Amino acid sequence: MEACRAIDVNWLHREGCLFAGWTGGWQWTRDGEKVASINLRTSADRLYLTYLVRIGGGDSEDLAETVRIGFSSGRFQFHAVP
């Protein structure tokens, strides 16, 4: 079964992370142990994600994704970047 992780963009905003040039990371834990992590970098309206993934016990692969950050209905939201 494929695992799906979530990032709370509103938490990032509350913590002051959504300004151009910010870099940092996010990690997920289970029972106090790190199970996944991701590196984050922001520009004026984008969040750049870089992470390592291993599917089915195979070799690890570096991935990079970019999402647009928008503000709607009083909350920040991610939007796919084509």
Image: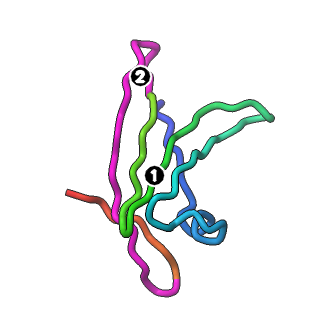
Our reading of the magenta stretch's main secondary structure is: strand
Q: Residue at x 52, y 40 (%)?
A: 38
Q: Position of residue 46 (x, y in %)?
A: 36, 62
Magenta segment includes 28? no
Q: Position of residue 63 (x, y in %)?
A: 35, 34
Q: Is disc 2 placed on a helix, strand or loop?
A: loop
Q: Residue at x 42, y 83 (%)?
A: 72
Task: Give the magenta-colored segment's residue range.
Answer: 53-74
Q: Residue at x 75, y 30 (%)?
A: 33
Q: Is residue 81 left or right of residue 22?
A: left
Q: Position of residue 4 (x, y in %)?
A: 49, 42
Q: Residue furthest toward the front? A: 21
Q: Which residue is under mark 2?
A: 55
Q: Is residue 14 left or right of residue 39?
A: right
Judge depth for marks 2 and 1 and give the one in front.
1
Residue 27 versus residue 10 in the image, above or below: above
Q: Which residue is under mark 1?
A: 41
